[in-house]
Each structure stands twice: as structure tokens, then as C-alpha cells.
Image: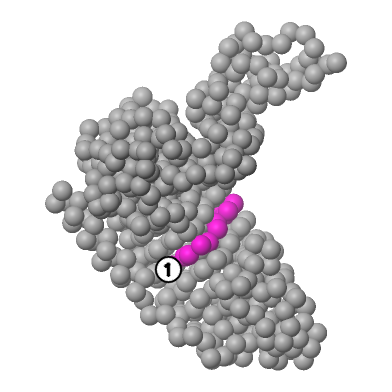
Amino acid sequence: MGSLFKRHCVLSFFIICIVGFPLKAAASNIVYCDVNATGNNDGTSWENAFTNLNDAIDSLSSGEVWVKEGHYAGETIDLSCGVSIYGGFSSELTGQAGDIDQRDLTSDLTIIDGEGTRRCLYPASYVDLDGLSFQNCDADAGGVMYNSCSSYIRFVNCSFKNNTAFYSGGAIVSFRPMTFENCVFESNRAEYSKGGAVYIDETSSFTGCRFAKNHAAYGGALYLSGSTTITNSQFLLNFSEYAGGAMYLRSWADIQNTVIAFNTSNYGGGVRSKGDLDVYNSTIYSNRAKYYGAAIYGYDVWVINSIVWDNYSLSCYDATNNIYSTYYPDIYYSNLEDGWPGTGNISEDPKFLIKQGCCEVPFQIDGTSPCVDAGHGCYAMEHDIAGNARFDAPSVPNTGAPTPDYTDIGAYEFVDVPVENCNQECDIDEDALSDDWEFSHFDDLNQDGDGDADGDGISNYLEFLMGTDPTDSTAVPTSGHRYRYDSLGRVRSITRVD
């Protein structure tokens, strides 16, 4: 346990270094920006708001720009040291009304649109960017922002969608420390290099972020060269051609309360790590690799309180559970599909709620899961990925270790989920196949619609539509359907004939 304690101490020191940077004092100056304002445009109220973000920024030496919902395009925003930007204010506000804590960031979108022709931000130090949606930004590197020297930039409650870089960092490239909180990165792309969403060559921190459908040659979502912490986050359906379907990590990394699922690459379908990798209370599920490490391809891997399940590698040389590491991995109090020697490890169906049609919380575990009260409390955060406090299930023996001895294994702590939130038709891996149908035929979600599990020339998707058994090559309707074939004689479509 000495090595475990050492890593835990290093983690605490690192968090202090990352989140302890100096934050700007509360703003004494606020100016207003609304692309649709019709007043005198001096920024003194919503009626008289600036219509141009750069004009609003230039009017301050320090302070805050409050921005109403709307579509802001036509220019690259030139940030200024000490001037923060807060978006997501309702179009209904008048005068100087507004409260940063009362914004509706799901409906009142402040969209910064690069229109597919330009980078969206020029950086500056000591800046918070909060409640902004960056889309269609484009550059050689860092579609949204390329930061070579500015310090203490923090993105909070921001979204990054459909941004592109020819080389690295579909959304962000930075050579200075960066912090992201409650941000969404979706469908960003680094065409020919690294970090489909983010490339950082310094320390970084990601909390409460979601990465989905990002794409790069290396590091489908993230390519990080400096030390990093990733907490309460999700990595889903990211892709890289060569290594690190979700992330490529070149230095020490700490991952806590995080879901890594349905990511794909040649090496390291979920994670490719070249430094020390510590994984706590996370769920690594149904990632794919062509060669090694469908879940993790690492250097020195340490896993505790985590679920590693249904990951799949095409290589017959891949390691058990698809964790491939230079040094033998240290794994404790975890649930691994193929088992693993080590204190507290189990190998039993984690009983995810996706099997009950709970689409919103697919990786929540139910009350009969062997993961309930089976983790090591010393290495768990006080709350899970969804903010649920650690809970001692009264009818479940505490098989974990103190303190407390009732931490659950995985990213989610067991809580009762309302019945109305379940029994739905889910497709969480977005392969056009019902998850319930996949589980009933394959007992996992490792198939896709284009596949042909039984080799009968009919894709899984078409078998799903027809209601035939995708594992039985003889289960092909011979009447009542019209078939269309491609040049190789494969069935491409089937039409029911009444």
C-alpha cells in the first residue's frame, strides 16, 4: 500500500497546483452586449448594449462583458487581459438586469460562429469565458483558439461543436496551463494530427466535461503532453486512426468519476498513456482497438474502484480485459470482465441500467449489482459523477475497504432511478441498433449496424429491421420481402412486400 499512498499524495499536490492559480477579483465594471440591440450602443444597459463583442471588450481595461443569447459572427474575438465574457443571458432582460447564476444555458445560447472560415478567439491572460457556444471555427491549428503564451484562461459552461483544424486541436491548442469546467466538445476534428477537440502541451484540468464524436489521427478527443486531472467527465464515441480513441496522454494523468465508452482506435481504444496513469471510480466500457489495449494501452497503469467491461480488441495477443501496459498494472477493488489478481477485485455482471432501458443514466448500477458497497473508500471522492453522495445501501453487505467501506465501484453510486426514466428504447452507442436488441442477441453492445455477425450477407441493421436472428445465418426471410444486392452480391436493402 505504500505505492498507493504515494500516488494519492502526488494527486493532492497536483490538484492544489492546478486549481490554485490566481483568479480575477469580482468585476466592478460590467458592459452589455446584444447583437440585436437598437439603442446608442455604449454598453451601459441591455437597451444600449454594444452589438459587437470586440467593441465591448475594447471598452474595458478590466471587468466583465455580459452577452445576450444570439448569433455572433463575422469576426475573430480579440480577448483582453482581465476582461471576462459571460454569455447565455435571456433576450427578455432589460435595463441592467441579470444574474450569472440564473442563466438558462441550454436554451439561451450565445453562439460564436466561425462560419467555417476563421479562428474564433485570440487569447489573453486572466480571462474567464463562461456560457459561450463555439461552432464552425476553423484554422490550421486550434480551430477556436491557438494559445502560445497567455496564462490562466478558463472555459466554463462552454460548448465546442463542429470546429476543425487542419493539423492539431480541432477546437483548442494551448502551450500554457488550461482549465475547463462543465464544457461540451462534440464533433470536432483535427484532420491530420493530434487532439480532435483539444491539444495541450502544459498542465490541464477537465471537470464535468463531455466529449463525443471527436476525431483525430492521435487522441480522438484529447492529446495532452502535460500532467492532467480529468474528473466527472464522459468520453463517448470518439475516434482516432492510430492511438488513443478517447485520449492520448504523454505525462502523468489522474482520471476520476469518469465514463469512457464506445471509443475506437488501432491502439488504446479508450486511452493511450505514456506516463503514469491513475484511474479511480471510473467506468471503461465497450471500447475497441484493432491491435492492443481496447480499454487502456499504457506505460504504468493503476486502477481502483473501476469497472472495465465489454472492451474488445481484434488482436489475439491483447491482454486480459484489454488492458495492455509496459509494466504489470496495479488493479484493486475493481470489476473486470475476465477477472484480475488483486485485493478486492471481482468479475461479475455490473448490472448497468442500460439493460433496463434507462437511457439518461445508462451506466448507473442497480441495487443488485456486485459493485454496490464494494469499493475502497479512501480513494473515492465524496460524490459520484452525477453529484450523488456515497451511500451505504442498507440491505447490502459492505465488502469494500474503509474509510468509508461502502463506496461503490464505477463512476456512479447506486441510487434509485424513477421507473418513468427507464423502459425506454435506447441506442446509447448510436449505431442504429436498439440496445435491448443487441443485449438480447449478443449480450453486449460491441456490434454495429454495418456488421454481419452471422455472415449471411445481411447486415445487422437489416436483421434488426426485419426482426430476424443476427446470430443465425439460416434465419433469412424467403417470402414477403424484396431484396436489393450490390455488385458483390451482398444484400444492401430489404423491402417488405405486403
Q: The C terminus is located in which quarter?
A: top right
Q: Nearer the viewer, residue 286 or 175?
A: 286
**Disc 1 designates what residue?**
178
**Farthest residue toward the right?**
498
* Quadrant of res 149: bottom left
Q: Main secondary structure of the magenta part?
A: strand
Residue 104 in view in this figure: yes
Q: Is label 1 in a helix, a strand or a loop?
A: strand
Decide: is 498 above or below 295: above
Residue 381 falls inside the magenta stretch: no
Taking the image as shown, residue 244 lies to the left or right of residue 489, namely left
Taking the image as shown, residue 155 lies to the left or right of residue 486, namely left
Identity of the residue drawn at 79% across and 15% down: 482
Q: Which residues make up the magenta segment?
A: 178-192
Badge 1: few (under 14), some or many (20 or more) residues near its Cα, within 10 Å? many
Q: Nearer the viewer, residue 232 or 396?
A: 396
Residue 17 location, x and y as percent? 30, 70
Identity of the residue drawn at 63% across and 66% down: 105
Taking the image as shown, residue 402 lies to the left or right of residue 78, namely left
Decide: is 337 above or below 237: above
Residue 268 in view in this figure: no
Residue 448 location, x and y as percent? 57, 30
